[in-house]
Amino acid sequence: MVNNGWVEPPAPLTNPNADTPSVGGDPTSTESLPDGVPTEEAPTRLGRGQERSPRDMALSLAVLLVPIALLLIFYRMVLSGDAPVTVDPTPTIQEAQQAAAFTVTVPHGLGTDWHTASATFQRENGGATLRIGYVDPGKGPMQLVESSVPPDKLLPGELGSGGKALGNYRTPAGVWRVYDGRAGEQALVLSEPTRTIVVVGKADLTSLQTLASSLG
């Protein structure tokens, strides 16, 4: 339109397909975010047919348990993981021999399925005591005690106050007294003028007799 020589500028052209900011629209829409900004997606959920079945869970559990079972078998069969811990009593026996408090007697001829579990030598008021712990083939624990402590002081501590004599057992070393010791324990006692030998433990009487007979 022309008015007194002034020409009105034309109105700016608009493109209906041009991107325009969205007002009040969906903030997650890709049209309302600048380039390079990731959009937020809804979490994916498994359908009913895609859920893990009991069989799948059992297979997953088996994958974990099979290696553990193989390790346990290797530990038991190859490394003898169930075998009792064995110690060497030789240094302790030599210490007792050097002390010369009494004549030290050691077992002979016990099989390889016998294990020495402990060994101690202690000087105390009234004498000295050597203690060697054993585990028999049936895994029964027992202890060999050799001491110069007087029997009336030694035996109550080794057998308990309720120990009762049940009979005798003869070996080349002498005649042993069979005692019923603490709950579940039995004992063999050999008394001599300068020492007392006690074989005591929760092993069966046959194993106690085997250990007593091996002393020489």
Image: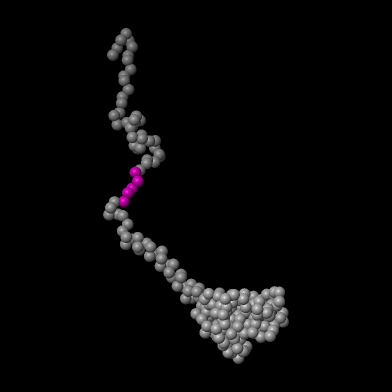
- Residue 184 visible in the snapshot: yes
User: Residue at the top extreme?
Assistant: 4
Residue in the picture at 59% in, 77% down: 159
x and y percentages locating residue 163 in the rendered image: 57, 78
Which sits in the foreground, 39 or 24?
Answer: 24
User: Residue at the bottom extreme?
Assistant: 172
Query: Is 48 positioned to the left or the right of 35 in the image?
Result: left
Q: Is residue 108 above or below residue 183?
A: below
Query: Is 167 positioned to the left or the right of 58 in the image?
Result: right
Specify whether residue 134 is painted magenta.
Answer: no
Which sits in the foreground, 166 or 42?
Answer: 166
- Residue 91 visible in the snapshot: no
x and y percentages locating residue 148 in the rendered image: 68, 80
Image quadrant in which the N terminus is located = top left
**Helix, strand or loop: magenta stretch:** loop
x and y percentages locating residue 72 in the rendered image: 46, 70
Residue in the picture at 34% in, 30% down: 24
Q: Which colour scheme is used?
A: one colour
Residue 145 is drawn in which quadrant? Answer: bottom right
**Bounds of the magenta span?**
42-46
Residue in the picture at 62% in, 89% down: 173
Residue in the picture at 31% in, 26% down: 14
Residue 195 is drawn in which quadrant? Answer: bottom right
Specify whether residue 44 is painted magenta.
Answer: yes
Which sits in the foreground, 180 or 63?
Answer: 180
Which sits in the foreground, 162 or 68?
Answer: 162
